[in-house]
Image: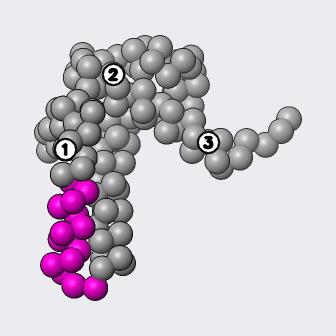
Amino acid sequence: MPKVTEAHIEARRQQILEAARTCFSRQGFHQTTVQDICKEAGLSPGAVYRYFPSKDHIIAATCLDCQQGIVDLIEAAKSEWGSPLQSLDFIVDHVIEWLNGDSSHEATMMNVQLWSEAMRSEEIKMRS
């Protein structure tokens, strides 16, 4: 049996998280079911549960991805620019570009839900 590559595992994980983000922004965390995520991702429940044992784990991974995106932006700003003012300008430019994007409303609504859930969820607190 062929061995599954790390790249394939990560691609499938991201496929599930992207489907989850779509469902969460459309329906909210608490109204979204794992079945909704499976349908959006085009995967069976068994395939989704292979990567995430529960919906709470999917929510936690979504929150952590969001946090990592912020960390990556800050790291890019620090490595690209010498002064704190230039770094701040870089970050502000990227945030404004993101806010002007086509999906900024959905992304903003989901980020509000993510941060709210992060305050309540022990799973997310433990992983952060």
Find residue 124 and report its horizontal and vertical position in percent: 27, 46
Q: Which mark is residue 23?
A: 2
Q: Which residues are magenta?
A: 82-95
Q: Main secondary structure of the magenta part?
A: helix
Q: Determine which residue is flagged by label 3.
A: 9
- Dot 1, how many residues are within 10 Å of its Cα: few (below 14), some (14-19), or many (20+)? some
Where is 26 relative to 59, above or below?
Answer: above
Where is residue 118 shown, x and y percent of the image? 20, 44
Measured in 3D between alpha carbons, the distance from the residue under mark 2 to the one under mark 1, in whole angstroms, is 20 Å
Going from N to C along the chain, the mark reached first, 1 or 3, is 3
Other residues around mark 3 within 10 Å, as few (<14) / some (14–19) / many (≥20): few
Q: Would residue 94 be counted in the magenta stretch? A: yes
Is residue 40 visible in the rendered structure shown here? yes
Amino acid, disc 1: Leu
> Disc 1 and disc 3: Cα gap in Å?
31 Å
Residue mark closest to the camera, 2 vs 3: 2
Q: Quadrant of the C terminus?
A: bottom left
Label 2 – label 3 distance at C-alpha: 21 Å
